[in-house]
Amino acid sequence: MNLLYCGDSGIEIGVMMSVLSVAEKTTEPLDVYILTAGFSVGDKRFIPISEDFSEKLKLALRDRGRADRVWLFDLTKEILSKPPLANMSTRFTPMCMLRLYADGVADLPKKIMYLDSDVMCVSDPKSLYETDITEYDIAGVPDRYGSLVFDGGIFRRRYINSGVLLLNLGQIRESGCFEKARLMCAEKKMFMPDQTALNKLAKKKILPGRFNCQKSERMDTVFRHFTTTLHILPYPHSQTVKPWQPERMHKVLKNYKYDSLYYECEERMKGILKK
């Protein structure tokens, strides 16, 4: 099973938690591919994910008796040579757009499952991974809010959330949809740049909600995505809680499910757990 993550050093603990959550729910061997980059935008500096982190992740998987592999690719040159200029300073960091460069990494397999670092695996993802997307570029679940705003109604729901995606890189390389999406991100400022570009340009297969639950878990949940949610009471506000924020997970969501995984990863990130 091929997994893809993208980002800078700020997502390391999230990636480790996400990967280990998948490893706990499947017996399939994992090939974990991580795309990273490092550069500055204004006063913000993005530091690439390190080889040290890659080794710690490998050790965490090996300690579970698994023979999974981890691959790290630094795409700094690629993203700086063709930067998403119009969206470098939006609410969403340019690191979100790293996945749009995946088609240019020759070592990536033709079929791969992309996960955001705030996605936790709840049950075996094999049924998602084995979904037939031969005729499609990508497959995903409708976005909880975006499908209402961008689809213009509650029934069409074809605007997908990009936090969990099944990618047909073979088809993507032929259709050029990632290349077109990069160009769109370079020329047109958008609220959710790469997600909006993919929805406009990719040939999509719509998946059932259990593959990307964006508010709460259900009986059939495969992936729980800890994305920002909107609330009316006690006053209109947005709410963001991530799996690596145990205090907020407890206080806001009353969720203790990922505590042991978080504390293990925190120790591993500090180099405390060594075999």
Image (cartoon, grey):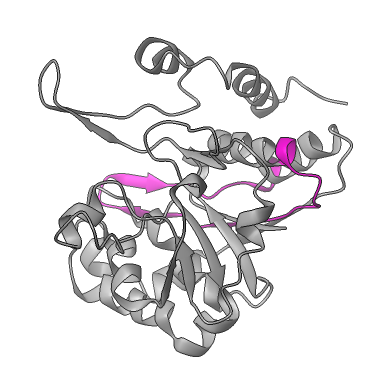
Relative to residue 119, is residue 131 depicted above or below? Answer: below
Residue 193, given in percent of the width and then of the height, sits at 27, 62
Residue 158 left/right relative to 66: left
Q: Nearer the viewer, residue 50 or 101?
A: 101
- Residue 43 within the segment the image draws in magenta: yes
Q: Which residue is at a point 65% across and 35% down the rendered structure image?
A: 21
Q: Which residue is at a point 65% across and 28% down the rendered structure image?
A: 269
Residue 237, given in percent of the width and then of the height, sits at 15, 27
Magenta region, residue range: 23-52
Q: Which residue is at a point 44% across and 48% down the rendered structure image?
A: 209
Q: Nearer the viewer, residue 117 or 253?
A: 253
Residue 107 left/right relative to 86: right
Residue 101 left/right relative to 67: left
Furthest-left residue in this view = 235
Query: Does residue 89 appear in the picture of this structure?
Result: no
Q: Quadrant of the N terminus?
A: bottom right
Q: Quadrant of the C terminus?
A: top right
